Amino acid sequence: MGQEIKLTGTNTDSDTTYLFLTGTNLNAGGVSLDRTGTFSQTPVRSDNT
């Protein structure tokens, strides 16, 4: 908790990227990054990043 992790990539399929974590001892469907109970969302920029 409290550590910053930089995520980078491209999305050419939609205007929104949904972020969530999966792994050992986590919900099989993934968990939210910001504790809101839903997947975190971020808009895709015009250069698809």
Image: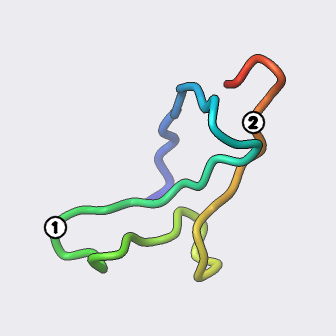
Q: Which residue is mark 2?
A: 44
Q: Position of residue 29 (x, y in %)?
A: 35, 75
Residue, x 68% and y 56% (percent of image)?
A: 41
At mark 1, the secondary structure is loop
Q: Nearer the viewer, mark 2 or mark 1?
A: 2
Judge left or right: residue 28 versus residue 15. Answer: left
Query: Eyeballing the image, is 14 above or below 22?
Result: above
Tell whether 25 sits left or right of 36: left
Q: Are marks 2 and 1 in contact (CB under 8 Å)?
A: no
Q: Quadrant of the N terminus?
A: bottom left
Q: Nearer the viewer, residue 35 or 31?
A: 31
On the image, the x and y values in percent for residue 15 come to: 76, 42
The way the protein has been coloured in the rendering is rainbow
Amino acid marked by disc 1: Thr
Q: CA distance from mark 2 to mark 1?
A: 29 Å
Q: Secondary structure at mark 2?
A: loop
Q: Residue at x 52, y 32 (%)?
A: 6
Residue 24 quadrant:
bottom left
